[in-house]
Image (cartoon, coloured by chain):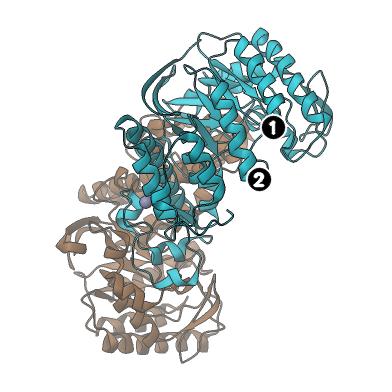
Chain colours: A brown, B cyan
Amino acid sequence: MKFAVKAWSKGRARSGILQIVGGSSCEIAIETPALLLSTRKGLPAFISPDLLPSLPSPDSHILQFSPLHFLEGLTPETMSNCGGLHQMLGLHEYGFVAVPRDSIVCVPECNGTNKIGASFETPCGRLLIKSLEYMKMISSMKPNLWATLADEVPAWVSVKRNKNSVDRTVRWLDECIALSSTGGAVFGAIVGGSSVEERQRCAQEVAKRNVSGYWLGGFGLGESMDERSPLLNAVTDNLPEQKPRQICGLGLPEEVLQGIASGVDLFDSTYIYDLTIGGFALIFPFDQIERNVSDSQPSAIGGDQTKINLKATVYRKDISPIVDGCSCYACQNHTKAYINHLLNVHEMLAQILLEIHNTHHYLGFFRAIRQAIKEGKFEQFRQQFIENRRHQIFAASLGS
Amino acid sequence: MALRFEILGRFNRARAAQLTLPHFVCQTPLFMPVGTQGTIKGLTTSQLEEIGCQIILGNTYHLALRPTSELIDELGGLHKFMNWPRALLTDSGGFQMVSLLHLADITEKGVTFQSPVDGKPMLLTPEESIQIQNRIGADIIMALDDVVRTTITGPRIEEAMYRTLRWIDRCIEAHKRPNEQNLFGIVQGGLDPVLRDICVRGLVDRNLPGYAIGGLSGGEDKDSFWRVVAQCTASLPEDKPRYVMGVGYPLDIVVCSALGADMYDCVYPTRTARFGAALIPEGVLKLKHRAMADDTRPIDPTCMCMVCKNYTRAYIHCLVTKDAMGSQLLSYHNLYYMMKLSNDLHSSIIEGQFPEFVCGFLQKMFPKGDVPEWVCNAMEVAGIDISSCCSPFTSSQY
Ligand SMILES: [Zn+2]
Ligand SMILES: [Zn+2]
């Protein structure tokens, strides 16, 4: 893995390039800030591998997975026999990033975690994962990047529990590095809950280790939007500039912008999964963010101007695509009326089409953010986006 | 009549034909996947084209409930609504009512049933069924027939057969788009050769664009099943397509094609996929089975589909019945298998290799030579020598 920061917008936001080598020595260059596509067992929840190439390339070529998902059926030995994830999934032109948790079906369970290992609620029940086991999975799956095991705790735990989680996470980091036998790049996990001091302490400790990048854990676990920025800055200010930073748990557009403002480079896409399951489609404009704010109409259709709910009866006869001019497979081939019908009759094609559109749309949002950073206009972009949203939500509340 | 049916090749009773429908030129024998609610579960229309699907089936009963035939009509028909450029067929809705609703009752007027929406009594007449199907706009529409379970015997079978004949005239009369949609009549008559014969003659007199053999695949024994098919195909006109309704096991399709049938439909390939089963030349592969967990072979090493080219049985094993992707990938493979089978039947007939194809098919499915007796009997009638794949001393029941 190689990473280089290419541009800074005034402040901490930066854009860069992450270069990784996929299967069969395939080189992949991903521009950051980037969205990693969340997967179930290596494939997006509903987008089958033959439909993946219809997403923007190379932006969509980096996939995130939880090794724990495979405990449901595959042993590390079989994964090794298959030749690792790239080989097993036939996705050589894609980069794979392993993170123990996925925020959807595999979530950290801090009460079950102890000094031996990290606890997770998973489809196969509550699991206690030790460094040794985790590293066995990593070496059989051969991801391009992998985050070390972390003791993630919610914002409300005691000072002592939080301090403990930092100590454990740093110890597990050393264990994971010692046990590592693959060529994949190590991302050191950083925790510290809602304490700026613990966040700093953890970041400083991890920064001393020989790692290729950093994984920011323990966000999106109950801290408020307002307290988050100081916590993020406490971490990124203590990390070397030339290494990539990945985060889990920040999904909403505002949260992504907040993370980027603090210098985070890589995000997950569980937000897209949540939207898709709820029948929502993203519609917010991102390429003309400065458009006249007063143009926006109050929403009466169960959305908030960033997204629409296609279950709403107003779409019953709407033969336009989700977003006019969108080049995704769903918008090029299907109407809102059809997706509305598919949702009404609980047909899986609805989720397939929504996941395609939402992924396509969010990748476009990230592209616009990178452009703004390169032009040194990130803060204006962010302010404008948040302003538009506030205005729209206000207008919607007046309209209803 | 809005179709052309040109026979391109034959082997005894089997035929390979080109069926030109308003939206697509199909090659027969062909299998029609079932897209009940305007979608084949878990697959996009471009995947269906890629797999080679030529015609898919929509269920009138479901579509009439949601999104309603009026809405489909207003938005330009089902082809446009689901963005499917190739051919479509809709059933009459009658069978779905009788099989899904406990309170369906058939009278001379039509099928009465309790509305699943508000519980009020409703009536589906032959006229209404055709009107609804005219609005949906499929290439082939089916006449409303009086459906009885094949396991029923007695005067009810006779009543249903005569009623089906009376209703066909009401269907023909009600059909408003004969130049864009083809109305197929359905042969009823249970397992009684005399009744089947009367029904075939009655329908043939009406000179319809095509004919279906109905009332089968309802739990009758296999020997009765193929004998009805053989009798009907023998007396239906040569120059019209013949559709055996509800048939979908690969073996049944091979046997029926040998007997001169052309079209089939079944939910089996996609339904069985959702339960974790893959169709393979040897029969069925249960991917849920523990033995699959460390099997690094493809589902079917001889299959050229996207799934078999990329995935191991082990990987599919950890997806099936847990993740949506499991049924998406297995449905893809299973439909690919059915399309390949249809295509193999078509080309082997044209190339004069049909008996060889049938023998090869049976050998893979019954490597010990224990071809079921009903298959042997049917093949004898079809004039196909399968002695090379039957062991001389075993004859087991299917
Ligand atoms: Zn789109
Ligand atoms: Zn296959």
Q: Is mark 2 within 8 Å of ligand 2?
A: no
**Pick the front one: A151 or B107:** B107
Residue type indicated by callout 1? Phe
Residue A200 or residue A88, whichever sits in front: A88
**Amino acid beneath label 2:** Asp
- According to the image, label 1 marks what residue? B95
Residue beneath disc 2 = B221
- Residue A138 image point, x, y percent: 32, 77
- Quadrant position of the C terminus of chain A in the picture: top right
Please tell me how crowded label 1 is: few (under 14), some (14-19), or many (20+) other residues with Cα within 10 Å.
many
The residue that appears at 63% across and 23% down in the rendered structure is B186
- The one of A344 and B334 positioned closer to us in this rendering: B334
Image coords of residue A32 (percent x, y): 25, 57
**Residue at point 83% right, 36% down?**
B103
Q: Above or below — where is A65 with respect to A156?
A: above
Residue B32 in sight in this render: no
Along the horizontal axis of the image, is A283 left or right of A95?
A: right
Q: Chain of mark 2?
A: B
Q: Label 2: how many residues lie within 10 Å, few (<14), some (14-19) or many (20+)?
A: some
Q: Can residue A35 be seen from the camera position used here?
A: yes
Q: Among all residues in the image, which is located at the extreme bottom?
A: A115
**Cα–Cα gap, marks 1 and 2:** 20 Å
Image marks 1 and 2: residues in contact by CB distance under 8 Å? no
Secondary element type, mark 1: helix
Q: Position of residue A37 (x, y in %)?
A: 36, 56
- Against B178, residue A266 (above or below) is below
Q: How many marks?
A: 2
Q: Quadrant of the N terminus of chain A?
A: bottom left
Question: Mark 1 belongs to which subunit?
Answer: B
